[in-house]
Image (spheres, helix red, strand yellow):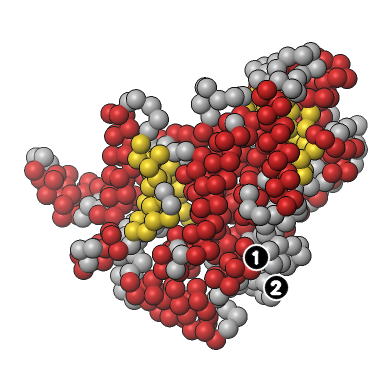
Amino acid sequence: MTSPDADAAWSALLALARRPGAGAIRPLFAADADRAARFTHRAGDVLLDGSRTSVSAEVLAALLDLARARDVAGFRDRMLGGAVVNPTEGRAALHAAQRGGGDPAVRDTLARMAGFVAAVHGGAILGATGARFTDVLNIGIGGSDLGPAMVARALWTPGAPMRAHYLANVDAHAWEALRARLDPARTLVLVASKTFTTQETMTNAALVRTWLVGALGEAGTGHLAALSTNLPAAAEFGIPAERVFGFADTVGGRFSLWSAIGLSLALALGWPAFESLLAGARGMDEHFAAAPLHENLPLLLALTELWHVDALGYPARAVLPYDERLARFPAHLQQLEMESLGKAVGLDGAAVGHATGPVVFGEPGTNAQHSFMQLIHQGPTPVPVDFILVANPDHPHADSHRKLLANGLAQAEALLVGKSLDQVRAEMQAAGADAARIDAIAPHRVFTGDRPSNLILVPRLTPATLGQLVALYEHKVACLGALWGINPFDQWGVELGKVLAGGTLAALEGRTVAGDAATRASIAEILRLQGRSAGAG
Ligand code: F6P
């Protein structure tokens, strides 16, 4: 901690966590009939019900003390105001400014994107054979893939202007599977890379360019556009300036879907939907900037996470969207949260000395229930859950939707209320089990309960509500960065593996021997299985 106030707030929090029953939730409901309402807050269309956690009024007060001592509001204001909040890279974090506020460069890019989308949809821009573009292929990885792919999966419907496809993995099985579904004459290709140097993306871009040229001749390169901050590299790849959509390096990859990186969405969903996505996120920005701390949704999510991770020692969190269309939302949050918060040193370079971002994972409900929920209900360590529910479906099957919601709510209730040994024994007795069987089986059927979850509810899944949800989690990440005194906007941890891959690639090509003893052994075995040997070329 960096100030006496913050140290005191942190100690007070840990003292609360050491009290017997600090993780209990049911007694909080027993003591406060209005707890559900008291711990429910709204921002725009998003409702956050934090009542099913062990954050009591007293714990919340201590958490808010910590937020004040760590000047989270000051950090927020500096971030939104364009100050350098990413000191290890010497940059501001201007993702919120991409959502169409007053920044002239952003307005200019949005206007160019809108013009391009209109020209593609209107037929002013056609493929090399004169055919209209029906499909857009986004080649990118990490933040240049996950956000747009997640949104496309969530919002695309058969009546949308174009189909969207996403190619990320350097594993060419992905490309082989995709190309079988694509017609080169009708496919527009976006090479999405902030740096335009990422090995996976540049390898895939070269494969796809070869495919275009093979089918359409050199004119096929006219199907390429670039989304990048590195304009010279895009030009070197052969993409003319008018087909390059830039953005500033102050936009982090995992925060970039609002920038030119979102072009696949504007093409596939239409410009009004893209604008509405941005407007939704802007609404959450306004809430984040103005709402009092005790009602500020991103901050409340962050404080609850800090309580779980640092005070109670829960090392993971599950994200369960009860909406199939949000199937990739957990994957987006995995990058957003773990790439941002997986840090062990503070801004001063010293070890933080406590846990930071938890492991984030998830699957859509109800699938998750038949997969990993066993561990969340009965494993020894609680795993907090974010349940994301959508009140109204966009299909006519009301019965299915009611069952979906019923399951989500029931999971949250089961985690909270649990089932005691006495209850289990009574149930088994009533079902006619004998005493020996009850003794043997009952302990296996106990649910401890008091397992925490947040419930996030939106009325309908629309571009606007999805924009709000994504921005909610982005700002939660910023709050945690401030609370933990770490930089949530760099990602040095991904670099070492990239560098070492250069050596392992040369070794797999048989050009050299590289790596530590374990890597050398693995490479030798792979080369043997490939019928080759080290140094054999
Ligand atoms: O390897 C991590 C990372 O740098 C992410 O932060 C980023 O989203 C991804 O790679 C892709 O980077 P780029 O957009 O520069 O290709």
Establish if 110 lies above or below 215. Answer: below
Q: Position of residue 419 (x, y in %)?
A: 22, 52
Q: Amino acid at mark 1?
A: Gly
Q: Position of residue 238 (x, y in %)?
A: 88, 32
Q: Where 535 falls versus 296 (above or below)?
A: above
Ligand 1 neighbours mark 1 (CB distance < 8 Å) = no
Residue 412 placed where, x, y %?
32, 49
Q: Amino acid at mark 2?
A: Gly
Residue 433: quarter of image = top left
State the image quarter where residue 522 is shown: top right
Which residue: 68% across, 22% down?
Answer: 122
Q: Is residue 496 visible?
A: yes
Is disc 2's CB within 8 Å of ligand 1?
A: no
Q: Position of residue 309 (x, y in %)?
A: 47, 64
Query: Within the image, what quadrant is residue 20 found in?
Result: bottom left
Mark 2, residues whose alpha carbon is within 10 Å: few (<14), some, or many (≥20)? Answer: few
| Residue closer to the observer: 142 or 420 | 142
Cβ–Cβ under 8 Å for marks 2 and 1: no
Q: Is residue 309 above or below residue 394?
A: below
* Quadrant placement of the N terminus: bottom right
Task: Label 1: state its secondary structure.
Answer: loop
Q: Is residue 39 left or right of residue 231?
A: left
Q: Earlier in the sequence, mark 2 or mark 1?
A: 1
Left or right, 22 with respect to 229, comes to left
Residue picked out by circle 1: 81
Q: Which residue is mark 2?
A: 349
Q: Residue at x 27, y 50 (%)?
A: 413
- Between disc 2 and disc 1, the foreground one is 1
Could you tell whether 386 is left or right of 339 in the image?
left
Bin the neighbour count of mark 1 within 10 Å (Cα to Cα): few under 14, some 14-19, many 20 and up: some
Mark 2 to mark 1 CA distance (whole Å): 25 Å
Q: Label 2: state its secondary structure.
A: loop
